[in-house]
Each structure stands twice: as structure tokens, then as C-alpha cells.
């Protein structure tokens, strides 16, 4: 029987369930997740736009760098899932925003700056796919960011990607990203430099002796 007392209890139960649902939704769609998605989208858009402006002869659909291998997307999916799970299980670890979130924000911006600026400084010598044959116009770039480190666009990618996980305050994904990316860039640099030495010989060897790689311990 729905007495006034039962109705009041029922309605207040519904109201608290609704406010709990709103609180949970608020935790999941926290500002850091919105920022993360905006930075992720901007990164891929900038890959295309910088190529279009500074390296137009290499512009293609793939310049968005979205066909970056399943493990790249799996890693970002892992980051999103970790963020949602931890937001539900340990809400106090995700909100309010802490020093870690702000550190992540600065790290993402720094990484994006390094990545896009390196692409601009290398201009037509940059290609998303590692060149195994030397194009006649391929010049060794040693100026700008390339005077500080040999692989500034990889440094930028590394810093940007780790920054996204710091922004989300994701402890597991931060460690996974550092390990997986370090291994990936170590192998990629080894292969890329084998080709660069065959293209530029002693000039590249001398450059390698003088300038650090830009990835720790590589
Ligand atoms: C994805 S880009 C990355 C460039 C560089 N490793 C970096 O992190 O900025 C790869 C292409 O850049 C070329 N490349 C790498 N370093 C270069 C340099 N210092 N000068 C000219 N071309 C370079 C390689 O031959 C390769 O085809």
C-alpha cells in the first residue's frame, strides 16, 4: 500500500540514487579526462597540420598518425579504463586536482611543443615512416632542436604520452607508458640511425658523438 510515508521514503530513495548517479558521472567525466581527450585529439590534428604546412610533399591520410599500430590505441584505452576504474574505486585519489595533474598538464604541453617544433625544424627531412633509402634532397638536420638532441620529435612524443597519464594521475599506466615507449624508441632509434649512418656516413657519426639522443639511456 502506497501510504504518504512510503511515498516520501520512495521519493527520497530515488532522489539519493539520482544524486549518487550524478556524483559518479561527475567523477568519471572529470575535467582531467576532458583535457586528456582534447590533448589527444589536438596531437593528431597537429601531426596533420604541421605536415601540411611544413612538409606538404609527404601529406597523406596517414599524416594524422592514427594508424599508429594497435598497441598505441590499446595503451591509451588502458589509460582511460584505469582512470574510470580508479575514479569509481578511489575517488579521493582523483579529485580534487593535485600537483600531479598540473605537472601532467605542463608535461603534455612541453611534449607537444617539442614534437611539433621538431617536425617544423626538420621540415621536408621529416617522415612518419623511417626512410630506408636516401632521397636526393634528404639533408642532415643539425640545427634548432636537433642541435640539442638527435631525436627531438621522439623526445616530444615520449614526454607528451607520459604527460597524458600524469594528467590523469594514473600510476599503473604512467609506469607502463614509460617502459613500453622507452623500449619502442630504443629499437626505433637503433634502426633509424643505421640508415642515417648509411646516408650521411662520418657526418652522422660525428653528430652522434657530440649530441645526446634525447631519450634517457639510449
Ligand atoms: C619520424 S622522423 C623522426 C626524426 C627524429 N628521429 C626525431 O625524433 O626528431 C624519422 C625520419 O627522420 C629522418 N631523420 C632523423 N634524424 C634526422 C636528422 N638529424 N636529419 C635529417 N633527417 C633525419 C630519418 O631518416 C627518418 O626517415
Image (tube, rainbow, N blue to C red):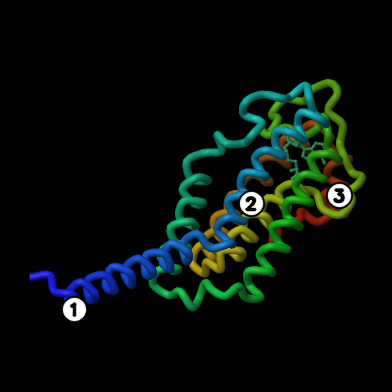
* Disc 3: which residue: 145
Q: Nearer the viewer, residue 152 or 33?
A: 33
Q: Residue at x 77, y 35 (%)?
A: 50
Label 2 vs label 3, nearer the camera:
3
Q: CA distance from mark 2 to mark 1?
A: 69 Å
Q: Earlier in the sequence, mark 1 or mark 3?
A: 1
> Residue 198, relative to residue 163: is it above or below?
above
List x then y, in percent, for residue 40.
61, 48
* Disc 1: which residue: 5
* Viewport quadrant of the C terminus: bottom right
Residue 69 visible at all: yes
Is disc 3 placed on a helix, strand or loop?
Answer: helix
* Disc 2: which residue: 186
Asked whether, in this view, residue 88 is left or right of residue 136, the answer is: left
Q: Does the residue tagged 3 have its C-beta within 8 Å of any atom of ligand 1?
A: yes
Q: CA distance from mark 1 to mark 3?
A: 72 Å
List x then y, in percent, for residue 168.
56, 64
Ligand 1: image quarter: top right
Q: Residue at x 54, y 73 (%)?
A: 95
* Viewport quadrant of the N terminus: bottom left
Q: Nearer the viewer, residue 5 or 151?
A: 5
> Residue 178, relative to residue 65: is it above or below?
below
Q: Determine crowd level at label 3: few under 14, some 14-19, many 20+ residues with C-alpha closer than 10 A.
A: many
Q: Earlier in the sequence, mark 2 or mark 3?
A: 3
Residue 169: quarter of image: bottom right
Asked whether, in this view, residue 162 is left or right of residue 15, the answer is: right
List x then y, in percent, for residue 199.
80, 31
Label 2 vs label 1, nearer the camera:
1
Residue 131: quarter of image: top right
Amino acid at each position: 500500500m502506497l501510504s504518504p510515508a512510503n511515498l516520501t521514503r520512495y521519493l527520497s530513495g530515488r532522489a539519493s540514487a539520482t544524486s549518487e548517479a550524478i556524483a559518479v558521472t561527475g567523477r568519471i567525466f572529470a575535467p582531467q579526462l576532458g583535457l586528456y581527450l582534447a590533448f589527444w585529439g589536438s596531437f593528431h590534428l597537429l601531426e596533420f597540420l604541421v605536415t601540411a604546412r611544413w612538409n606538404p610533399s609527404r601529406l597523406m591520410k596517414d599524416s594524422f598518425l592514427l594508424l599508429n599500430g594497435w598497441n598505441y590505441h590499446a595503451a591509451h584505452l588502458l589509460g582511460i579504463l584505469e582512470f574510470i576504474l580508479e575514479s569509481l574505486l578511489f575517488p579521493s585519489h582523483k579529485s580534487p586536482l593535485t600537483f600531479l595533474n598540473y605537472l601532467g598538464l605542463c608535461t603534455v604541453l612541453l611534449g607537444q611543443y617539442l614534437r611539433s617544433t621538431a617536425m617544423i625544424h626538420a621540415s621536408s627531412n621529416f617522415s612518419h615512416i623511417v626512410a630506408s633509402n636516401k632521397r636526393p634532397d634528404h639533408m642532415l638536420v643539425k640545427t634548432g632542436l636537433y642541435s640539442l638532441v638527435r631525436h627531438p620529435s621522439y623526445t616530444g612524443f615520449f614526454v607528451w604520452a607520459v604527460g597524458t597519464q600524469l594528467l590523469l594521475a594514473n600510476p599503473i599506466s604512467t609506469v607502463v607508458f614509460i617502459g613500453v615507449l622507452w623500449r619502442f624508441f630504443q629499437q626505433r632509434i637503433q634502426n633509424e640511425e643505421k640508415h642515417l649512418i648509411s646516408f650521411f656516413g662520418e657526418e652522422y657519426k660525428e653528430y652522434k658523438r657530440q649530441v645526446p639522443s634525447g631519450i634517457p639511456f639510449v
